């Protein structure tokens, strides 16, 4: 227990120092995601240059092609086999989301203990599930750009992912996952904010992350913040850090969010979006 406390304090001090200095040290698995982001932000970059970066990562290449061939994004069924064609088909916003999903999947496997790997894998599946619901809801409601919604949904747990990845440097934290979950809940918000700013995401996405007031109450959800909040409630894969802390308030939150409407309207939205969510989930997580 003493070793846990010592390493938790050392980790907290390191994170606090990096936040104060405005420089977070990103795990190497996120390098490809950051390179794609920088290229996508540069108006002089070409799709061929971006495709070249994607080709350098075999898993990302395979999943980009799979996503491009998903019925949701390729309704006419023209088979896509080239990475460059896949990049053009899925678009840069979806590619950013996919690149992060692949990086997060790699991070999930980069732990010593079985417990930590299980938590990391669970968090990855939860994030992909929220992203898939976000895309499917936006596509059905037509109030938010679906690609923007998917990227925002994937970023919901970005602070937790970062802390989980960096925890590999502090192995004693793996000895008490419940205490580690408390540690993550303490640092999730400030780290998440810092990462979103470091990624220089569009204002539309940054504005969606209102930690103090995450849900505005509009139905159907018309802004990005409300949409990803509802997607989080719809996600069928739980956030493992919530489970470790005994947080199980999804049903109560859902009742609150749908209090002013006929609950059947929410169920209709779920039914309408479910097929699209499953198609996208299979493409990203398959």
Image (spheres, rainbow, N blue to C red):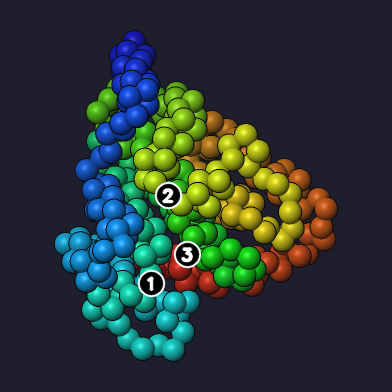
Q: Which residue is mark 3?
A: 147
User: Quarter holding the C terminus?
Assistant: bottom left
**Dot 1 alpha-carbon crowd within 10 angstroms: few under 14, some 14 to 19, many 20 or more:** many
Using the numbered discs, state the Cα–Cα distance from disc 2 to disc 1 in whole angstroms: 19 Å
Q: Which residue is mark 1?
A: 90
Instruction: Report x, y in % for residue 139.
Output: 57, 70
Of residues 77 and 174, the one nearer the viewer is: 77
Reading the chain from its start, which is encountered first: label 2 or label 1? 1
| Residue 201: image tag | 2
User: Quarter holding the N terminus?
Assistant: top left
Labels 3, 2: front one: 2
Using the numbered discs, state the Cα–Cα distance from disc 1 to disc 3 in whole angstroms: 9 Å
Q: Are marks 3 and 2 in contact (CB under 8 Å)?
A: no
- At a point 39% along the width and 46% down the height, the residue shown is 200
Reading the chain from its start, which is encountered first: label 1 or label 3? 1
- At a point 53% along the width and 38% down the height, the residue shown is 243
- Image height of 155 relative to 19, above or below: below
Q: Are marks 2 and 1 in contact (CB under 8 Å)?
A: no
**Dot 3 alpha-carbon crowd within 10 angstroms: few under 14, some 14 to 19, many 20 or more:** many
Q: What is the secondary structure assignment of the residue under circle 2? A: loop
- Left or right, 192 with respect to 265, comes to left
- At a point 25% along the width and 64% down the height, the residue shown is 45
Task: Name which quarter of the figure residue 173 lies in.
Answer: top left
């Amino acid at each position: 227990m003493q070793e846990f406390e010592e390493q938790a304090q050392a980790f907290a001090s390191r994170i606090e120092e990096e936040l104060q200095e405005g420089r977070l040290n990103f795990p190497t698995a996120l390098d490809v995601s950051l390179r794609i982001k920088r290229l996508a932000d540069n108006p002089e970059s070409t799709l061929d240059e971006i495709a070249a970066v994607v080709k350098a990562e075999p898993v990302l290449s395979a999943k980009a092609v799979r996503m491009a061939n998903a019925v949701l994004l390729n309704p006419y069924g023209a088979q896509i086999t080239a990475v460059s064609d896949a990049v053009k088909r899925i678009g840069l916003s979806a590619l950013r989301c996919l690149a992060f999903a692949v990086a997060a999947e790699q991070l999930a496997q980069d732990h010593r203990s079985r417990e930590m790997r299980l938590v990391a894998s669970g968090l990855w599946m939860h994030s992909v599930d929220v992203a898939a619901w976000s895309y499917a809801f936006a596509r059905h409601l037509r109030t938010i750009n679906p690609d923007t919604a998917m990227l925002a949904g994937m970023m919901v747990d970005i602070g937790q992912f970062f802390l989980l990845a960096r925890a590999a440097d502090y192995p004693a934290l793996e000895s008490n996952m419940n205490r580690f979950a408390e540690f993550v809940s303490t640092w999730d918000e400030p780290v998440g904010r810092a990462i979103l700013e470091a990624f220089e995401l569009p204002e539309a996405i940054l504005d969606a992350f209102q930690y103090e007031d995450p849900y505005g109450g509009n139905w159907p959800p018309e802004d990005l913040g409300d949409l990803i909040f509802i997607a989080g409630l719809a996600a069928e894969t739980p956030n493992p850090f919530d489970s470790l802390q005994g947080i199980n308030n999804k049903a109560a939150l859902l009742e609150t969010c749908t209090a002013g409407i006929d609950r059947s309207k929410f169920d209709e939205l779920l039914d309408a979006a479910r097929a699209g969510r499953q198609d996208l989930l299979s493409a990203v997580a398959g």
